[in-house]
Amino acid sequence: MNKRKNILSSAKKALSKEISSIKTLTDTFNNNFYKAVELIHNIKGRVIVTGVGKSAHVGNKVSATLTSTGTPSYFIHATEASHGDLGNIKKGDCVIAISNSGETSELNNIIEFTKRFNVSLISITSNSKSSLHKNATIGILYKKPIEACPLNLAPTSSTTMSMIIGDCLAISLLELRGFKSKHFKNFHPGGNLGKDLKYVSELMHKGSSLPLAKFNEKMSKVIVSMTQKSFGCIGVVNKQNKIIGIITDGDLRRKINSKFFDKQASEIMTKNPTIANKEMLVGEAISLMNSKKITSLFVCHNKKPVGIIHIHDLLRLTS
């Protein structure tokens, strides 16, 4: 019991230290951070992220996040940079160097390279007196944290803070570029995110599969079409083939009577049905269908039905 208690206590202490460190980052988002975002946004080349040790792992993740959110980026390990990888840094690029101490010796060659070839250097460090910060074009400083490690040695709080700064750079740039879900889809076609970011037009039933009826069609014929198409609904279109309503299985149960079969579709339909456009994403469609409590959704172009999706089509994709 004491062992379990001690383990949980250690975890909570570590969490508390990291949360306390993160809270100090509000002071980091100042004019220098703004300048760094502007600099990255205006460069013609790529963002080269570098670091050593745990900062290298952070840098790799920051670079990946930048790339997937619309800012072309490349990670170079500072040690490998000294053995030929500096050749990957081109005119018009910008370097982000991450180091808690700012005195990591392996970064010296990169610092000299950026100065020699006039490449912008953004530093992320906690040491304002460090050679990295002093030689940076723009320095992003964070308050030196107490590491979550009880010895205050293992990079824990500091790496978390560096990663958050990198994430905030990426998100600020994402919003500045007007980067949307449809753009993210291009860079992330795989995994569950990729599934949610598919367009409904990639999954919709179309052509002869579409359950449609003219506004003046008799319900005796409409029911036959509904049964044949098996979507549990049918769209009602006007003379211009634009959707004006929908009839569902529920409508049939609620409105059926002795004169029902002689009525026209327009008399039974629910007007102004919820529709999707071809550019709607699967994730958006699922949210819309859940919020409206509907199981089928017509996909339209200029209000003309071009397809239909069923909730089961979407759930099969995302399961």
Image: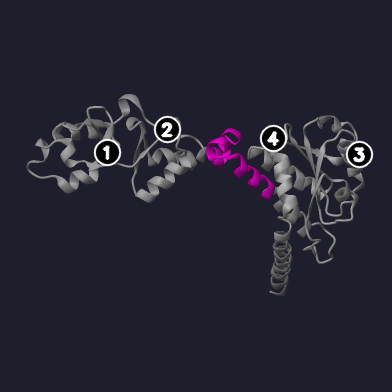
Label for residue 72? 4
Q: Observer-nearest residue: 201 or 237?
A: 237
Quadrant in the rendering for residue 112: top right
Residue 234 magenta-drawn?
Answer: no
Please report contact status of discs 2 and 3: CB closer than 8 Å, yes or no: no
> Mark 2 or mark 3, which has the lower sequence index?
3
Spatial CA distance of label 2 from label 4 is: 28 Å
Q: Residue 233 has which mark?
A: 1
Would you say the magenta stretch is mainly helix, strand or loop? helix
x and y percent of residue 76 in the render? 81, 38
Q: Nearer the viewer, mark 2 or mark 3?
A: 3
Q: Can residue 202 be seen in this view?
A: yes
Q: In this image, 120 relative to 42: left or right?
A: right
Q: In this view, does 182 lie above or below 239?
A: below
Density class for disc 1 (Cα within 10 Å; few <14, some 14-19, many ≥20) is many
Task: Identify the element where label 2 is drawn.
Answer: loop
Residue 157 figure quarter: bottom right
Left or right position of 270 against 196? left
* Part of the protein shown in magenta: 168-194
Is 177 within the magenta?
yes
Q: What residue type is labelled 2?
A: Lys
Residues tagged 3 and 4 counted as in contact (Cβ below 8 A): no
Residue 113 appears left or right of 122: right
Q: Is mark 3 on a helix, strand or loop?
A: helix
Q: Position of residue 6 (x, y in %)?
A: 73, 71
What crowding class fits label 4: few (fewer than 14 Cα within 10 Å), some (14-19), or many (20 or more)?
some
| x then y, percent, for residue 177 | 61, 39
Q: Which amino acid does label 3 sit on?
A: Glu
Tag of residue 112: 3
